Amino acid sequence: QVQLVESGGGLVQAGGSLRLSCAASGRPFSTYRVGWFRQGPGKEREFVAAIRWSSTYVSDSVKGRFTISRDNAENTVYLQMNSLKPEDTAVYYCAADPRGPITMATYEYWGQGTQVTVSS
């Protein structure tokens, strides 16, 4: 079992930055595929970015603005979000899975989410 806890969300003005953290406990997850998803008000859940080993995969909607990285010593994956826009407002979730390629959409473990609100 892996427990995931997101943090770092909050209120920020458009153009600002936030760094989200996804801390894992239960077992080391350096070999896990870890993804970030978001769900805005009235919208479907949307893939944002994923990392597997040192490979990363970022959705076109955030490419060039968001970066995913991991610190295996801290058992944490980060999502650095720059040049934030009001349309980035959403609850952001991290997810982890020990199996599958980086592009796989399904994940076994999910966090509870952290709210990001971008004001115009």
Image (cartoon, helix red, strand yellow):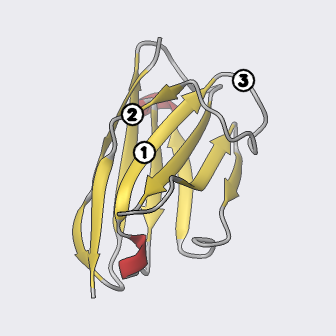
Q: Position of residue 119 (x, y in %)?
A: 25, 81
The reply to whether callout 1 and callout 3 are in contact (CB within 8 Å) is: no
Question: Which circle's residue, 3 or 2, is located before the other in the chain?
Answer: 3
Q: In the rendered view, would you say 55 is above or below 74?
A: below
* Element carrying mark 3: loop
Question: Which residue type carries mark 2?
Answer: Gly
Q: Residues within 10 Å of mark 2 (few under 14, many from 20)?
A: some
Relative placement, left or right, of 107 versus 8 is right
Furthest residue to the right? 101
Residue 111's disc is 2
Could you give the CA–CA distance between mark 3 and mark 2, rounded to whole angstroms?
A: 17 Å
- Which residue lies at the image location 55% right of the left edge and 62% below the top edge? 67
The reply to whether callout 3 and callout 2 are in contact (CB within 8 Å) is: no
Residue 99's disc is 3
The reply to whether callout 1 and callout 2 are in contact (CB within 8 Å) is: yes
Q: Quadrant of residue 60?
A: bottom right
Asked if residue 86 shows in the view, the reply is yes
* Element carrying mark 2: loop
Question: Which residue type carries mark 3?
Answer: Arg
Residue marked by disc 1? 93
